[in-house]
Amino acid sequence: MGIEFKMKKIILFFLALTSLAFASDSAIWGKDMILNIAQYDKEGSLHLGALFTLLQSTYFKPLFFGVLFGIPVIFFIHYMIIGPMIFSHDRKKIYVFSVFNRMVHTIAGIAFIILIPTGLVMMFGTTFGGGEFVRFCKEIHAISTLLFIVSIVPMFFMWLKDMLPTSDDIKWMMILGGYLNSRKDPVPAGKFNAGQKMWYWIATLGGFLMILTGAIMYFQDFKIDFVASLITQIDLLRGSAILHNVLGLAVLALFLTHVYMSVFAIKGAIHSIITGYKEEEEVEILHSSFYKELKEKKEL
Protein backbone atom coordinates (compact mmCIF):
# COMPACT_ATOMS: atom_id res chain seq x y z
CA MET A 1 0.00 0.00 0.00
CA GLY A 2 2.93 2.35 0.84
CA ILE A 3 4.56 1.84 -2.58
CA GLU A 4 1.26 2.43 -4.38
CA PHE A 5 0.72 5.67 -2.41
CA LYS A 6 4.24 6.90 -3.27
CA MET A 7 3.71 6.24 -6.98
CA LYS A 8 0.41 8.15 -6.97
CA LYS A 9 2.12 11.09 -5.22
CA ILE A 10 4.89 11.13 -7.84
CA ILE A 11 2.38 11.08 -10.72
CA LEU A 12 0.33 13.87 -9.11
CA PHE A 13 3.53 15.89 -8.65
CA PHE A 14 4.33 15.69 -12.39
CA LEU A 15 0.74 16.62 -13.26
CA ALA A 16 0.92 19.62 -10.94
CA LEU A 17 4.13 20.84 -12.59
CA THR A 18 2.52 20.48 -16.01
CA SER A 19 -0.52 22.49 -14.87
CA LEU A 20 1.70 25.29 -13.55
CA ALA A 21 3.58 25.40 -16.86
CA PHE A 22 0.32 25.70 -18.80
CA ALA A 23 -0.92 28.40 -16.43
CA SER A 24 2.22 30.50 -16.96
CA ASP A 25 1.99 30.06 -20.75
CA SER A 26 -1.68 31.10 -20.73
CA ALA A 27 -0.77 34.36 -19.05
CA ILE A 28 1.37 35.26 -22.06
CA TRP A 29 -1.49 34.73 -24.51
CA GLY A 30 -4.26 37.12 -23.53
CA LYS A 31 -7.72 37.33 -25.10
CA ASP A 32 -6.83 40.45 -27.09
CA MET A 33 -3.82 38.79 -28.72
CA ILE A 34 -5.87 35.77 -29.78
CA LEU A 35 -8.56 38.05 -31.24
CA ASN A 36 -5.88 39.98 -33.16
CA ILE A 37 -4.69 36.75 -34.78
CA ALA A 38 -8.27 35.71 -35.56
CA GLN A 39 -8.91 38.85 -37.59
CA TYR A 40 -6.53 37.60 -40.28
CA ASP A 41 -8.78 34.64 -41.05
CA LYS A 42 -10.72 34.85 -44.28
CA GLU A 43 -14.41 35.57 -44.11
CA GLY A 44 -16.39 32.33 -44.11
CA SER A 45 -13.52 30.28 -42.67
CA LEU A 46 -13.65 28.21 -39.49
CA HIS A 47 -11.39 30.80 -37.77
CA LEU A 48 -8.78 28.24 -36.77
CA GLY A 49 -6.00 30.82 -37.07
CA ALA A 50 -5.96 31.80 -33.39
CA LEU A 51 -6.11 28.22 -32.12
CA PHE A 52 -3.54 27.03 -34.64
CA THR A 53 -1.09 29.81 -33.79
CA LEU A 54 -1.57 29.35 -30.05
CA LEU A 55 -1.01 25.60 -30.16
CA GLN A 56 1.88 25.66 -32.62
CA SER A 57 3.82 28.49 -30.98
CA THR A 58 3.07 27.89 -27.30
CA TYR A 59 1.80 24.44 -26.39
CA PHE A 60 2.83 21.66 -28.76
CA LYS A 61 6.61 21.84 -28.27
CA PRO A 62 6.46 21.87 -24.44
CA LEU A 63 3.91 19.07 -24.51
CA PHE A 64 6.03 16.88 -26.78
CA PHE A 65 9.11 17.68 -24.69
CA GLY A 66 7.20 16.84 -21.50
CA VAL A 67 5.97 13.49 -22.85
CA LEU A 68 9.35 12.57 -24.35
CA PHE A 69 11.24 13.10 -21.10
CA GLY A 70 8.54 13.03 -18.41
CA ILE A 71 7.18 9.56 -19.15
CA PRO A 72 10.62 7.84 -19.12
CA VAL A 73 11.37 9.58 -15.79
CA ILE A 74 8.11 8.25 -14.29
CA PHE A 75 8.88 4.76 -15.60
CA PHE A 76 12.42 4.93 -14.23
CA ILE A 77 11.00 5.79 -10.79
CA HIS A 78 8.48 2.94 -11.16
CA TYR A 79 11.27 0.51 -12.04
CA MET A 80 13.44 1.63 -9.11
CA ILE A 81 10.64 1.55 -6.51
CA ILE A 82 8.50 -1.38 -7.63
CA GLY A 83 10.71 -3.20 -10.10
CA PRO A 84 9.80 -5.56 -12.94
CA MET A 85 7.29 -8.38 -12.75
CA ILE A 86 9.07 -11.73 -12.96
CA PHE A 87 7.18 -14.86 -13.90
CA SER A 88 8.20 -18.50 -13.85
CA HIS A 89 9.68 -19.95 -17.04
CA ASP A 90 9.34 -23.52 -15.77
CA ARG A 91 5.67 -23.99 -16.60
CA LYS A 92 3.90 -24.36 -19.96
CA LYS A 93 4.34 -21.90 -22.76
CA ILE A 94 1.10 -20.69 -24.32
CA TYR A 95 1.01 -19.97 -28.06
CA VAL A 96 -0.57 -16.51 -28.40
CA PHE A 97 0.76 -14.83 -31.54
CA SER A 98 0.80 -16.46 -34.98
CA VAL A 99 3.58 -15.98 -37.53
CA PHE A 100 1.32 -13.54 -39.40
CA ASN A 101 0.65 -11.57 -36.19
CA ARG A 102 4.36 -11.29 -35.52
CA MET A 103 5.22 -10.32 -39.09
CA VAL A 104 2.65 -7.51 -39.18
CA HIS A 105 3.68 -6.31 -35.72
CA THR A 106 7.34 -6.22 -36.81
CA ILE A 107 6.56 -4.09 -39.86
CA ALA A 108 4.48 -1.70 -37.73
CA GLY A 109 7.21 -1.59 -35.09
CA ILE A 110 9.88 -0.67 -37.65
CA ALA A 111 7.58 2.03 -39.05
CA PHE A 112 7.04 3.56 -35.60
CA ILE A 113 10.77 3.44 -34.80
CA ILE A 114 11.37 5.59 -37.90
CA LEU A 115 8.24 7.76 -37.80
CA ILE A 116 8.51 8.92 -34.19
CA PRO A 117 12.13 10.22 -34.20
CA THR A 118 11.77 11.86 -37.62
CA GLY A 119 8.48 13.43 -36.53
CA LEU A 120 10.16 14.84 -33.43
CA VAL A 121 12.98 16.28 -35.54
CA MET A 122 10.36 18.05 -37.66
CA MET A 123 8.57 19.31 -34.52
CA PHE A 124 11.84 20.72 -33.11
CA GLY A 125 13.20 21.72 -36.51
CA THR A 126 14.59 25.08 -35.36
CA THR A 127 16.43 23.36 -32.49
CA PHE A 128 18.17 21.15 -35.05
CA GLY A 129 19.06 24.19 -37.12
CA GLY A 130 16.58 23.48 -39.91
CA GLY A 131 18.15 22.96 -43.32
CA GLU A 132 19.01 19.72 -45.06
CA PHE A 133 18.86 17.46 -42.01
CA VAL A 134 15.28 18.43 -41.16
CA ARG A 135 14.24 18.17 -44.82
CA PHE A 136 15.88 14.74 -45.00
CA CYS A 137 13.90 13.62 -41.92
CA LYS A 138 10.73 14.96 -43.53
CA GLU A 139 11.27 12.78 -46.60
CA ILE A 140 12.18 9.71 -44.50
CA HIS A 141 9.05 10.36 -42.43
CA ALA A 142 6.94 10.36 -45.59
CA ILE A 143 8.59 7.22 -47.01
CA SER A 144 8.26 5.27 -43.75
CA THR A 145 4.56 6.13 -43.74
CA LEU A 146 4.23 3.73 -46.68
CA LEU A 147 5.64 0.99 -44.43
CA PHE A 148 3.05 1.87 -41.80
CA ILE A 149 0.23 1.76 -44.37
CA VAL A 150 1.26 -1.80 -45.28
CA SER A 151 0.81 -2.91 -41.65
CA ILE A 152 -2.14 -0.86 -40.41
CA VAL A 153 -4.91 -2.63 -42.36
CA PRO A 154 -4.01 -6.25 -41.46
CA MET A 155 -3.24 -5.15 -37.88
CA PHE A 156 -6.68 -3.59 -37.54
CA PHE A 157 -8.58 -6.67 -38.73
CA MET A 158 -6.44 -9.43 -37.19
CA TRP A 159 -6.91 -8.14 -33.63
CA LEU A 160 -10.24 -6.30 -33.92
CA LYS A 161 -12.34 -8.92 -32.11
CA ASP A 162 -9.94 -9.17 -29.17
CA MET A 163 -9.62 -5.39 -28.88
CA LEU A 164 -13.33 -4.63 -28.39
CA PRO A 165 -14.08 -3.16 -24.93
CA THR A 166 -15.28 -5.42 -22.10
CA SER A 167 -16.13 -4.98 -18.43
CA ASP A 168 -12.61 -6.20 -17.61
CA ASP A 169 -11.23 -2.97 -19.05
CA ILE A 170 -12.93 -0.85 -16.38
CA LYS A 171 -11.63 -3.14 -13.62
CA TRP A 172 -8.14 -3.02 -15.16
CA MET A 173 -8.16 0.78 -15.26
CA MET A 174 -9.29 0.99 -11.63
CA ILE A 175 -6.16 -0.88 -10.49
CA LEU A 176 -3.89 0.42 -13.30
CA GLY A 177 -3.26 -3.14 -14.38
CA GLY A 178 -1.76 -4.05 -11.00
CA TYR A 179 1.47 -2.23 -11.87
CA LEU A 180 1.44 -0.06 -8.73
CA ASN A 181 2.37 -2.97 -6.50
CA SER A 182 4.71 -5.95 -6.65
CA ARG A 183 2.12 -8.58 -5.72
CA LYS A 184 1.04 -11.28 -8.16
CA ASP A 185 -2.71 -10.77 -7.87
CA PRO A 186 -4.73 -11.99 -10.90
CA VAL A 187 -5.50 -9.01 -13.14
CA PRO A 188 -8.87 -8.89 -14.98
CA ALA A 189 -7.99 -8.90 -18.66
CA GLY A 190 -8.65 -10.92 -21.78
CA LYS A 191 -6.05 -11.70 -24.43
CA PHE A 192 -5.26 -7.97 -24.41
CA ASN A 193 -5.61 -5.62 -21.45
CA ALA A 194 -7.11 -2.11 -21.45
CA GLY A 195 -3.71 -0.46 -21.93
CA GLN A 196 -2.94 -2.58 -24.97
CA LYS A 197 -6.38 -1.83 -26.35
CA MET A 198 -5.81 1.93 -26.03
CA TRP A 199 -2.55 1.57 -27.92
CA TYR A 200 -4.25 -0.54 -30.61
CA TRP A 201 -7.01 2.03 -31.28
CA ILE A 202 -4.58 4.95 -31.33
CA ALA A 203 -2.18 3.02 -33.58
CA THR A 204 -4.87 1.90 -36.06
CA LEU A 205 -7.74 4.41 -36.25
CA GLY A 206 -5.51 7.19 -34.94
CA GLY A 207 -2.79 6.04 -37.34
CA PHE A 208 -5.21 6.21 -40.27
CA LEU A 209 -6.06 9.83 -39.37
CA MET A 210 -2.37 10.64 -39.05
CA ILE A 211 -1.73 9.20 -42.51
CA LEU A 212 -4.56 11.32 -43.95
CA THR A 213 -3.60 14.54 -42.17
CA GLY A 214 0.07 13.93 -42.92
CA ALA A 215 -0.71 13.59 -46.64
CA ILE A 216 -2.69 16.84 -46.57
CA MET A 217 0.23 18.69 -44.98
CA TYR A 218 2.89 17.04 -47.15
CA PHE A 219 1.23 17.82 -50.46
CA GLN A 220 -0.36 21.11 -49.20
CA ASP A 221 -2.55 21.49 -52.28
CA PHE A 222 -4.18 18.11 -51.48
CA LYS A 223 -7.89 18.55 -52.21
CA ILE A 224 -11.05 16.52 -51.90
CA ASP A 225 -13.99 18.14 -53.71
CA PHE A 226 -16.49 17.28 -50.99
CA VAL A 227 -14.23 18.68 -48.25
CA ALA A 228 -13.29 21.73 -50.34
CA SER A 229 -16.96 22.65 -50.56
CA LEU A 230 -17.16 22.74 -46.74
CA ILE A 231 -13.93 24.39 -45.58
CA THR A 232 -11.16 26.51 -47.05
CA GLN A 233 -7.78 25.03 -47.94
CA ILE A 234 -6.02 26.98 -45.18
CA ASP A 235 -8.50 25.64 -42.61
CA LEU A 236 -7.92 22.13 -43.91
CA LEU A 237 -4.17 22.55 -43.46
CA ARG A 238 -4.51 24.11 -40.00
CA GLY A 239 -7.00 21.51 -38.83
CA SER A 240 -4.80 18.71 -40.18
CA ALA A 241 -1.75 20.09 -38.36
CA ILE A 242 -3.65 20.37 -35.07
CA LEU A 243 -5.14 16.86 -35.31
CA HIS A 244 -1.82 15.37 -36.47
CA ASN A 245 0.03 16.83 -33.49
CA VAL A 246 -2.64 15.87 -30.93
CA LEU A 247 -2.60 12.29 -32.21
CA GLY A 248 1.20 12.44 -32.34
CA LEU A 249 1.27 13.20 -28.62
CA ALA A 250 -0.93 10.19 -27.91
CA VAL A 251 1.18 7.95 -30.16
CA LEU A 252 4.42 9.08 -28.48
CA ALA A 253 3.03 8.57 -24.96
CA LEU A 254 1.56 5.14 -25.67
CA PHE A 255 4.56 3.97 -27.71
CA LEU A 256 6.92 4.79 -24.83
CA THR A 257 4.53 2.99 -22.47
CA HIS A 258 4.33 -0.03 -24.78
CA VAL A 259 8.12 -0.27 -24.98
CA TYR A 260 8.54 0.05 -21.21
CA MET A 261 5.90 -2.58 -20.44
CA SER A 262 7.18 -5.12 -22.97
CA VAL A 263 10.92 -4.63 -22.40
CA PHE A 264 11.31 -3.58 -18.76
CA ALA A 265 8.13 -3.81 -16.64
CA ILE A 266 7.47 -7.49 -17.42
CA LYS A 267 10.71 -9.43 -17.57
CA GLY A 268 10.94 -11.42 -20.81
CA ALA A 269 7.58 -10.21 -22.17
CA ILE A 270 9.10 -9.02 -25.43
CA HIS A 271 9.95 -12.62 -26.37
CA SER A 272 6.26 -13.37 -26.89
CA ILE A 273 6.12 -11.22 -30.02
CA ILE A 274 9.33 -12.87 -31.25
CA THR A 275 8.51 -16.53 -30.57
CA GLY A 276 4.71 -16.29 -30.30
CA TYR A 277 4.69 -17.89 -26.83
CA LYS A 278 3.85 -16.40 -23.43
CA GLU A 279 4.75 -17.95 -20.09
CA GLU A 280 1.77 -19.67 -18.45
CA GLU A 281 2.16 -17.79 -15.16
CA GLU A 282 2.25 -14.44 -16.98
CA VAL A 283 -1.03 -15.26 -18.74
CA GLU A 284 -2.57 -16.60 -15.53
CA ILE A 285 -1.76 -13.39 -13.60
CA LEU A 286 -1.86 -10.57 -16.17
CA HIS A 287 -4.59 -12.00 -18.44
CA SER A 288 -6.67 -13.95 -15.93
CA SER A 289 -9.93 -13.87 -17.93
CA PHE A 290 -8.13 -15.15 -21.04
CA TYR A 291 -6.47 -17.87 -18.93
CA LYS A 292 -9.84 -19.01 -17.54
CA GLU A 293 -11.24 -19.07 -21.06
CA LEU A 294 -8.37 -21.27 -22.26
CA LYS A 295 -8.91 -23.66 -19.33
CA GLU A 296 -12.65 -23.88 -20.04
CA LYS A 297 -11.91 -24.71 -23.68
CA LYS A 298 -9.33 -27.24 -22.48
CA GLU A 299 -6.65 -25.55 -24.59
CA LEU A 300 -4.08 -25.69 -21.79
Image (cartoon, grey):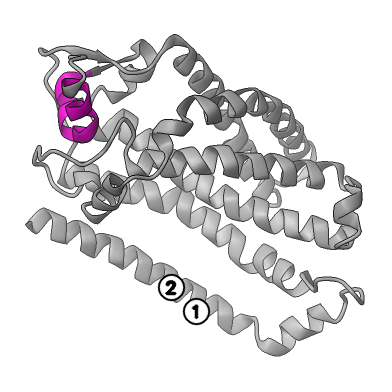
Queried whether the magenta region covers residue 281, the answer comes back as: yes
Q: Which residues are magenta?
A: 279-295
Residue at 24 percent of width and 15 percent of height:
94
| Pointer 2 local density, CA inside 10 Å: few below 14, some 14–19, many at least 20 | few
Residue 87: image x %, image y %?
14, 25
Residue 272: image x %, image y %?
32, 18
Residue 198: image x %, image y %?
43, 45
91 or 219: nearer the eye? 91
Does residue 100 appear to the left or right of 152 in the view shown?
A: left
Does residue 266 appear to the left or right of 243 in the view shown?
A: left
Q: Which image quarter: residue 97?
A: top left
Tell me if residue 127 can be seen.
Answer: no
Q: CA distance from mark 2 to mark 1?
A: 6 Å
Tag 1 residue: 23
Residue 19: image x %, image y %?
43, 73
Could you tell me which secondary element the residue under label 2 belongs to?
helix
| Amino acid type assigned to the residue bearing label 2 in the image | Ser
Q: Main secondary structure of the magenta part?
A: helix
Does residue 161 appear to the left or right of 84 in the view shown?
A: right
Q: Which image quarter: residue 242?
A: bottom right
Tag 2 residue: 19
Residue at far front of view: 297
| Amino acid type assigned to the residue bearing label 1 in the image | Ala
Tell me if residue 48 can be seen.
Answer: yes
